[in-house]
Image: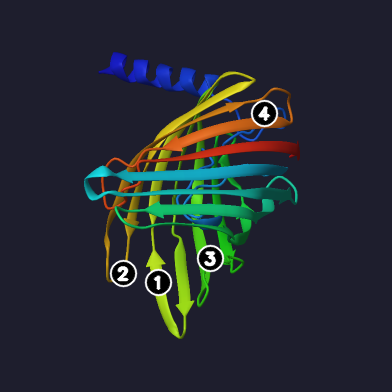
Amino acid sequence: MRATAAALALASFLVAAKARALCEPEARDPSAPARIGFGPAGFGSLPEACAATSIALQGDAAILVATDEFYGSIGAGAAVRARYAFGDRVWVSAWLPGPSYFYVANATVDASSVDIGASAIGVHVSLPFSKRARFAPFARTLLPTETIYENAVRYGFDHGFTVAVSALERLEILSGMSFPLLLTDGSGTVHASFGPLLRAEASYTPFRWLQANAGFSLRFRGGDDATFESFEPLLGVRVFPIAPLRLELAVRLPLAGHDRTDVGATFNAGWTFGR
């Protein structure tokens, strides 16, 4: 028993010794979950756990093909994401929408539209538990800039947290929860959609110019039509051609639940000015 306890203590010490501190100034995009979500303006995704000032162009797309029901849809959109850090613990974020495209078809009818998407602003805080662990709560508000609604307006609020732990020198464990609430007001009738999300992933950095993220999300839907929305594995790859520039591709694959989307994908090209 003593030998086992000693071995466990030694292993814990070696792991701790190899683990690196989080949010180091020289690190490239540290403690950042894959930048992919299911909702408007990035709702339903986990933000970064480290403060930074940056700007990025992001494109999102999702495809649904139901051949048995002769139904399908394609959605795509672009936006500018920005963050501004007030020191190393507090920052604000903004999502500025570009055009969004939506196409839907069944056996007899097809339709498409090009509109402006939703905007969002947020406040984020990074609280260190230790040099190797951070807790980062956040709150975001959806701004009603969408033009797809002719006789309605959609508002929203999202809050939650990201937890980052440095497990090894090149490995971080990222997890957290998000609680997006969307309110659509149409002619005096308000429809509420509440979609809590639990997410966990690992971020591995084999080289300074390369990161890979892998994990999963569990999504639920609350309210009168409460259901299990989705279990979706996710993958992400980041490349840093030069230190401030980030190129990221991420995909999510809903495998079970009410969400029938076949695949969702995100491409993000960002520039970090400093932390």
Mark 3 or 4: in front is 3
Cα distance in 3D space between marks 2 and 1: 8 Å
Q: Earlier in the sequence, mark 4 or mark 2?
A: 4
66 up-or-down from 152: above or below: above
Q: Measured from the top left, where is residue 35 in percent x and y?
A: 54, 41
Q: Tag 1's secondary structure?
A: strand
Cα distance in 3D space between marks 1 and 4: 40 Å
Cα distance in 3D space between marks 1 and 3: 18 Å
Cα distance in 3D space between marks 3 and 4: 40 Å
Q: Tag 2's secondary structure?
A: loop
| The residue positioned farthest toward the right in the image shown | 273
The residue nearer to you, when weighing 259 against 11, is 259
Q: Earlier in the sequence, mark 3 or mark 2?
A: 3
Q: Earlier in the sequence, mark 1 or mark 3?
A: 3
Q: Measured from the top left, where is residue 182 in percent x and y?
A: 46, 67
Residue tagged by mark 3?
148
Q: Amino acid at mark 1?
A: Ala
Which image quarter holds the C terminus? top right
Q: Earlier in the sequence, mark 1 or mark 4?
A: 4
Q: Tag 3's secondary structure?
A: loop
* 258 horizontally vs 193: left or right: left
Q: Measured from the top left, where is residue 156 in percent x and y?
A: 51, 67
Residue tagged by mark 1?
192
Residue tagged by mark 4?
27
Is disc 2 in contact with disc 1, using a CB cutoff of under 8 Å? yes
